[in-house]
Image: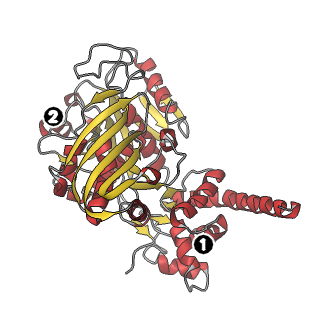
Amino acid sequence: MSQQMLETVFEEWQDNEALAEEMIPLLGKLYRQYNIVTSLFGRSLINQSVIRILKDHRFVKKVEGTELSVQDTFPLVKAMTELNLGPAHVDIGKLAVAYKHSDAEDVTSFLERELAEIVGAHCKVKGNGEPKDVVLYGFGRIGRILARILVEKAGGGNLLRLRAIVVRGRGDLAKDLEKRASLLRRDSVHGPFSGTISVDHDGSALVVNGNYIKVIYANQPSEIDYTAYGIDNAIVVDNTGMWRDEEGLGQHLACKGVSKALLTAPGKGDVKNVVYGINHTDIAREDRIVSAASCTTNAIVPVLKALNDKFGIEHGHVETVHSYTNDQNLIDNYHKGDRRGRSAPLNMVLTETGAAKAVAKALPELSGKLTGNAIRVPTPNVSMAILNLNLHQQTDAEALNDYLRRMAIHSPMQKQIDFVDSTEVVSSDFVGNRHAGIVDAKATIVDGKNAVVYVWYDNEFGYSCQVVRILQHMSNVSFLAFPMNRD
């Protein structure tokens, strides 16, 4: 390559960097002023760095086979800031590809047509609706990640408002507040919190990116009157797992100021187990107690549904390779569960999982067709589900992978199914992934009707994103998504 060509390549990179830098405040304006959540073929563009934005544009070629650069997307982003848009989710990448193949005279006329339902729909007076109060009951791994996501979304005008967290009292309350703040501020797996956190000792609260979050100390739900803190008609998200049936979770509903309860664990009895993107529409108005099922169930159900819809599943086995959790011991010690008492960082621990049976609660058509087991392994986060399936139809790895790739990009399950096609990825590459599960295409094995599909999932962050999606649905917080399928 000549020196002139080298300089040209570098100049192109610098031009793209400059455009990405110019794009960031425009994306921020769309998010905070108009509540427009932008993405690039499913990759969020909110609060991203210049390099991250450029890498996400590169990602499009890998999954879609289409070259896309900030030169293509920047004109659309800039034009969107001038259309006084109403709240929505907009995939800039898909719009840019559509614009390339359209006969539109200019970007503005193209966007006015594609985003017609929200053009000029912004209302400063009414905003986007009435905020919905949310309370986190329990502030462990899932509770703190939910807090991060809810605070992040509040910055863009999302209607969910984290008003309080409930924890057990631990002696010196001043020190306890500082410790809660510290655990939210620093995370060994997910890194530092993006923003500022301060402690209001007099008010027993955390102030997180401007969100005033009351810290309530209680040992039982019956001890709490939420209306005393100005909280009303709230959804309580129970992260403790202490109660998993209607009777136990009903304790939350008996509290003043509470309208509904959402469990972040598999529900028992008549409690509906919901996987967002699959059966969330089964939540009826009168349902006051709902379960978000388990992280593994959320990871495998969307992929299983996609495969069953296309190829049919006769039977199969799900083997979960799961990171250790706080339920296990650091060193060998007594544990009521079989094998779980052995040191989590030093052993692979064979244990049980109810995920295979739980699939039937979200996908009744697969009832009795799956078995399952689990192995806990010495990693702190990101797990894998291995789906060993016998299909109704014969296929091959290329066709199966291409189908799942399309499901990950263009189907209603694009927020649940992600897709990676690389021989180099390992578990830590998926920390912070917001999808319920990620299909590893290079690991797929197909022999006629027998298929083995490997699905990665961030059992903390990806699952928490699914929980927030259910929260939004239960709160009637939903926005149009563009581009729309207008066929």
Residue 51 is marked as: none
In-image side of 44 versus 248 (left or right): right
Secondary structure beneath disc 2? helix
Q: Position of residue 278 (x, y in %)?
A: 27, 57
In-image side of 474 versus 324 (left or right): left
- Residue under numbered circle 1: 79
Q: Position of residue 453 (x, y in %)?
A: 36, 51
Looking at numbered disc 1 in the image, what kind of residue is underneath it? Answer: Ala
Q: How many numbered marks are there?
A: 2
Which residue is outermost to the right? 3
Considering only vertical position in the picture, is 349 above or below 307? above
Identity of the residue drawn at 51% across and 62% down: 63
Q: Mark 2 to mark 1: distance in Å?
A: 52 Å
Secondary structure beneath disc 1? helix
- Residue under numbered circle 2: 248
Question: How many residues crowd mark 2 within 10 Å: few (<14), some (14–19), many (20+)?
Answer: few
- The quadrant holding residue 346 is top left
275 vs 183, nearest the viewer = 275
Considering only vertical position in the picture, is 212 above or below 454? above
Residue 212 appears anywhere in the view = yes
Identity of the residue drawn at 61% across and 67% down: 68
